[in-house]
Image (cartoon, rainbow, N blue to C red):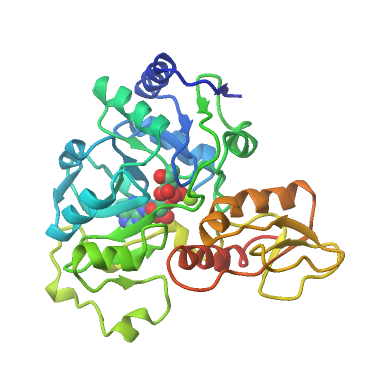
Amino acid sequence: MSQFLSNCSVDALATAAQSLREGSLVAFPTETVYGLGADATNAQAVARIYEVKGRPADHPLIVHIADLKYLEQWISDIPEYAIALAREFWPGPMTLILQRSELAKDFITGGQGSVGIRIPDNSLALGLLDAFHKLGGAGIAAPSANRFGQVSPTTAEAVQEELGSYLSDTDLVLDGGPSVVGVESTIIDCTGELPRILRPGAITIEMIEEVSGLKVSDSTEKKSEEVSGLKVSDSTEKKSDDFKREDIRVSGSLEIHYAPKAKVFLDQQPVYGSGFIAIKSINTPNGVIRLAAPESVEEFARVLYSALREGDHQGLSSIYIEQPIGNGLAVAIRDRLARSTQGRN
Ligand code: TXA
Ligand code: MG
């Protein structure tokens, strides 16, 4: 059982940073979802992340840093457009995939030639990272703090529920209240001439195109390459020796993911006794349990995972969701929901 810290003073963050340096795990809030952190240069600590999550060991982890000045040590190359994106959207819900340096070992990158980096926009996360860098730490590796394939936690209680029995006495869970974004960061592959979205999130394709001035492809939206005429050609890409762009693996893009125990149905008439999530203007059908009634797409993202968890707490066998339409954050919500329907039930 881990320790649960709800009043995170500067001293408490320094203690948490020290635990990380000593090889313990620290779960912490970010603006997207809660992460399960380990010292990204400590192979044994990182191995425990995989154990606690029950995640296959070849899946790469995102390295979190507090400031752009800590980026350089992790990477060997960065295109101009990625620098522009970093300046504009960090700290924020965006992960950049860049060619790795020697510091980013196989146990972080899953043996790939690239590394994922993010500066989160959450004061507690940044406080922890600052304290960690002060102790000589280079970065905190942190996947979402859920068991593999399950719904990401957006509160410290949800982390405790997911992982509490797998964590040890020296591990910590920091409570920073509910995550404000609610879905995981946008992952952008920046190893080619053009940015490519590997996982949609709150930093949208429109925002990336505006800042980079480039046409962006979204590999998560089927046929988007054909539609935009952007078939990425291998020969035009810069690669390190051990790196091939098409080899990139994103565990979030596996079919089974983000799945509650209940079976999820999308855009269908809910049956009696099932859970229901939809934008507020849609009425609750008779005999159906309303789990969330968000007023905007932003609120939809913020409450979605806790609503799915609530359905599980209530022991519901099915949850019906009316998906938000349109671009922007709605794309990320539909992406996660499409995967959650493939899951266990
Ligand atoms: O919002 C987020 O990104 C949260 C918070 C805690 O920062 N983290 C998160 O981590 O969602 P995780 O491990 O649950 O999902 C990160 C995804 C994984 O699917 C992983 O495969 C992908 O990022 N990823 C990490 N490094 C990569 C790399 N070098 N190349 C391709 N994909 C990578
Ligand atoms: Mg995850």
Residue at the spot x=58%, y=37% of the render?
159
Among the 4 quarters of the image, the one containing residue 141: top left
Q: Is residue 289 visible?
A: yes
Is 90 on the left or on the right of 171, as rendered?
left
List x then y, in percent, for residue 237: 15, 69
Residue 4 in the image: above or below residue 149: above
Q: Quadrant of residue 211?
A: bottom left
* Residue 102 x, y percent position in the rendering: 17, 42
**Image height of 27 relative to 74, above or below:** above
Which residue appears at 30% of the width and 26% of the height?
130
Instruction: Check the image and report above or below for 249 versus 266.
Output: above
Measured from the top left, where is residue 106 in percent x and y? 29, 45
In the rendered image, the residue lying farthest to the top is 11
Please identify the quarter of the rendering in which residue 39 is found.
top left
Residue at image location 23% in from the left, 55% down from the top: 85
Q: Nearer the viewer, residue 173 or 345?
A: 173
Residue 57 visible in the current orientation: no
| Spot occupied by residue 248 in the image (x, y as percentages of width and height) | 32, 62
- Left or right of residue 188: residue 337: right
Left or right: residue 10 versus residue 230 is right
Quarter placement of the C terminus: bottom right
